[in-house]
Amino acid sequence: MKLYKSILFAGLMLTSVACSDFEEMNVSPNSPSQSNTASMFTGAIRTVGAMNSQVGPGGFNIVPALYVQQFGDVTYIEDSRYKTINFSYNGLYTGPLVNLQAIIDQNSNDATKNAVAVSGSNNNQIAIARILKAYIFQWMTDRWGDIPYSQALKGSQNFSPAFDKQQDIYNDLFKEYKEAAAQFDAGTTVKGDILLSGNAARWKKFAATQRLLAALQLSKVDPAKGKTEFAAALADGVLASNADNVRYSFLADANNENPLYNNYITSNRKDFAVSDVFVNYLKKVSDPRLPYIAATNQRGEYAGVPYAVFPATGPSQNFSLAASTLSAQNAPVNIVTYAEVLFAQAEAAKLGWTTGDAKALYESAIKASLQQWMGAAYTDAAYTAYIAQPDVAYSDAKAIELIATQRWIALFFQGTSAWNSWRRTGFPVLKPAAAPLNGGTAIPRRLAYPVSTEGTLNTTNYNAVIASQGPDTPYTRVWWDKP
């Protein structure tokens, strides 16, 4: 119990007060006096679902989706104009990360590992916890840049952790994913895994896929390492079909319903609709995914909300909300898809990292995305017609732009992934909000730290990271984001 209390207290290393939406969603599913690693897994995975689906003012996922203009706000025209500058990650440290570290420690400690083995073999629990922990840290560093990492989650050993450079974090994440995947054994399946049901083969594919995508992030800042890591991940086995897609499943239950449903139906707010930038582009290329991404408005038309236009131009009924494939009460949210993997391979082939056929991979990625979104309505005829259009047909001279633009479509409502792609490639070309509220003139390139806690409770390290990384503003680029 003493060990667990120490780990749990580590989550308070930055603050005991945080303003993140995650704070309410990350109540520990266990108590310090009774460790239940199955419940801890479930709680951590629920956070992964929230990370990839949250909506509402300041919602973690909707903000990057607004930056890349997949969505626009309807009533309070603020988030699309970049009003919020500082975002809190404190709930991620105090919730899933501290619990995943507890799982690792309890399955490693001779005094506790036999007791917690009722939730799965020690090695299998450690492997999944390491992969999930790496995934959350990767998600965080892509948003904030340098973050507390190697000194984080140390309990009473360190309440003021230093910030690790993103380059060092990435180097360690490649190692963590690879080592964790190799740690699975033939022992008991992990309980409480509501993402992949403890399936070791699927977790290994997920880990290799995250390595693959992380490697591509290095395309401008360290292409030699990116190429090496990309090839290694590909060889270890990444997602190989839409059947491998990793999705978090919500329930037809008010306690675990899809956040878009909560915003649209339960709360009747309808804060966000599909942006006119996104809808108009899909119309321009006669994209067959449009009905599966956007709903029609009250006139039966696909009409995106004017992006960042203030004052509001009309009620939500005038605009296309997200389609029911995304907004039904039990609609799942995508974590990572086969289409994204194929777009990564197409780009890697174009960069000369692999011997693959960039054109064939690009077209296969589009096909996989159409099949993913359209389901049984997909036809080869629709696909063939779509890729023959001038704005879609592969051109070696415009390969990166085409790949990135199609990835932008395929990653609808995968805000962080879409923002990562846009920042790294510059495509599609997007115009910033006309009247930003953050004092800048461009689309944000990172989230600023929770300065109310970091600046007051971890002042020395906060000042050090600013001196090293750059000003704590939305326009200081993260390490891998190079012009």
Image (cartoon, rainbow, N blue to C red):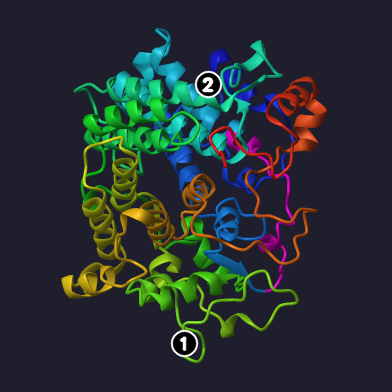
Magenta region includes residue 169: no
| 235 left or right of 70 in image | left
Mark 1, secondary structure of its residue? loop
Residue found farthest to the front: 397
Residue range of the region highlighted in magenta in the rendering: 75-92
Q: Which residue, given by chain and number where applicable, does mark 2 sit on? A: 168
Disc number for residue 301: 1
Tell which circle, 1 or 2, labels the residue nearer the N-terminal end: 2
Instruction: Give neighbour class at mark 2: few <14, some 14-19, many 20+ (Cα, 10 Å).
Output: few
Residue 37, horizontal then vertical, whole percent: 42, 29
Q: Residue at x 32, y 38 (%)?
A: 209
Q: So how many labels did they put on this image?
A: 2
Disc 2 marks which amino acid? Asp
Residue found farthest to the bottom: 299
Q: Does residue 254 lie above or below 306 as drawn?
A: above
Q: Residue at x 25, y 64 (%)?
A: 371
Q: Main structural element of the magenta stretch: helix, strand or loop?
A: loop
Disc 1 marks which amino acid? Glu
Q: Quadrant of the C terminus?
A: top right
